[in-house]
Amino acid sequence: MSAELFYLFLTSILLTLMWIPHIIGQVKHGGPLQPEEYVKLRDSSELPHWVKRANRAHINLVEQFGAFVGLVVVAHLLQVSTELTALAAAIYFWSRILHAVVMISGIKIAMLRTLIFTASWAALLVIAWEIAAAKLF
């Protein structure tokens, strides 16, 4: 298994687990959902901020995950696997872990979460560039 596929596998596991903190927070602070709450969503305004941030961290990963999957699969199918794509895949995974930790914990260092997100986005661009450089130019 290439490093890129390995980090795709790990990121898939991360995505599979990221909903859990939000649900634990929901149940801990509001109890299990009642039947009517499956139709009309529960008011989340009373939830602690960390629970709301856990939900946002999960949604943020969902939003960016498709691009990572697409790029890693295309790189694999085109047999593009370089030291740079492997490093970018690792940076993507570890920056997503760090992003979740910073987001959920509410660490208040100016721009830290944005910088971490930008690192994961830049890693996607590196993988895309390596594919393009190897197969298009």
Image: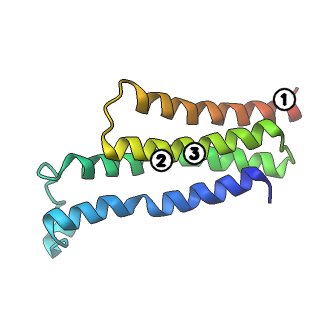
Where's residue 91, x and y in %?
Answer: 63, 40
Where's residue 110, x and y in %?
Answer: 35, 24
The N terminus: image quadrant: bottom right
Q: Is residue 15 left or right of residue 86?
A: left
Q: Which mark is residue 133?
A: 1
Which quadrant holds residue 134?
top right
The residue located at (62%, 45%) in the rendering is 68
Of 49 and 33, the residue lying toward us: 49
What amino acid is at disc 1? Ala
Which of the two marks, 3 or 1, is nearer to us in this view?
Answer: 3
Total marks in image: 3
What amino acid is at disc 3? Trp
| Residue that badge 3 annotates | 94
The residue located at (15%, 73%) in the rendering is 34
Give the CA distance from mark 3 to mark 1: 25 Å
Asked whether residue 39 is in view, the answer is: no
| Residue that badge 2 annotates | 61
Element under label 3? helix
Of 24 and 35, the residue lying toward us: 24
What amino acid is at disc 2? Leu
State the colouring used for the structure image: rainbow
The residue located at (31%, 58%) in the rendering is 22
Q: Is residue 41 left or right of residue 91?
A: left
Where's residue 117, x and y in %?
Answer: 49, 34
* Above or below, 47 relative to 137: below
Element under label 1? helix
Give the CA distance from mark 2 to mark 1: 27 Å
Of labels 2 and 1, earlier in sequence is 2
